[in-house]
Amino acid sequence: MIYRTSIPALVQKFRRNEDGNATIEFAILFPLMLMMLFAAVELGMINYRQIMLDRAMDMTVRDIRLGTGGDMQHDDIRDTICARSGFIKMAECNVSLKLEMVRLDPFNWGGIPPQADCVDSIEEADPLINFTNGGSNDLMFLRACASVDVLFPNWGLGDALQKDEGGRVNLYASSAFVQEPQ
């Protein structure tokens, strides 16, 4: 015996059936929840790296300030910041961290260059921009720019971040200090 049902009866039966209801909600909401999780992890790692770069910069500047009479060299300062930051590998330090140190005149203020120059991971490494050792009572400005890889470069927050040609994000840290008199 063949049962024939009308189309409105089939539609009404389909509407009443709740099989697969949770699967549809899961298929719609799971990618959104996953994207929020990845964005939170990405933001946490970027904040962690920024905090560690700031901390390394502060500790290094404190050593420079208190260790007067010593000749500050670019490579030593760069290596110290890399070692203290915890996320920059020493083998990649000369490629991923760029330092700039300038002497400022507080009585004839010329300002600080607003745009920091960062390392382009595609080009040949040129870590030295402007690096001037200061004398007694000189006001010095030190700025570091570290290029770091993002965890999820093509998804979520990692896709929305401003990156250089190599797909790396630039983190900046700066500090000003006065050379102690000798």
Image (cartoon, grey):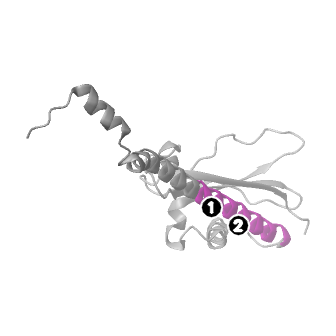
**Which residue in the protein does label 1 denote?**
49
Quick one: SS at disc 1?
Answer: helix
- The image position of residue 130, as x and y in percent, is 65, 52
Residues shaded magenta: 43-66
Name which residue lies at 38% across and 50% down: 23
Q: Is residue 64 magenta?
A: yes
Which quadrant is the C terminus positioned in?
Answer: bottom right
- Write down the quadrant of residue 58 in the picture: bottom right
Q: Is residue 155 above or below residue 99?
A: above
Q: Indicate left or right for 154 with 53 as reference.
A: left
Q: Which mark is residue 56?
A: 2
Viewer-side label of 2, 1: 1
- The image position of residue 100, as x and y in percent, is 66, 54
Tag 2: Cα neighbours inside 10 Å, few (<14), some, or many (≥20)?
many
Q: Indicate left or right for 11 with 39 as reference.
A: left
Count of numbered circles on the image? 2
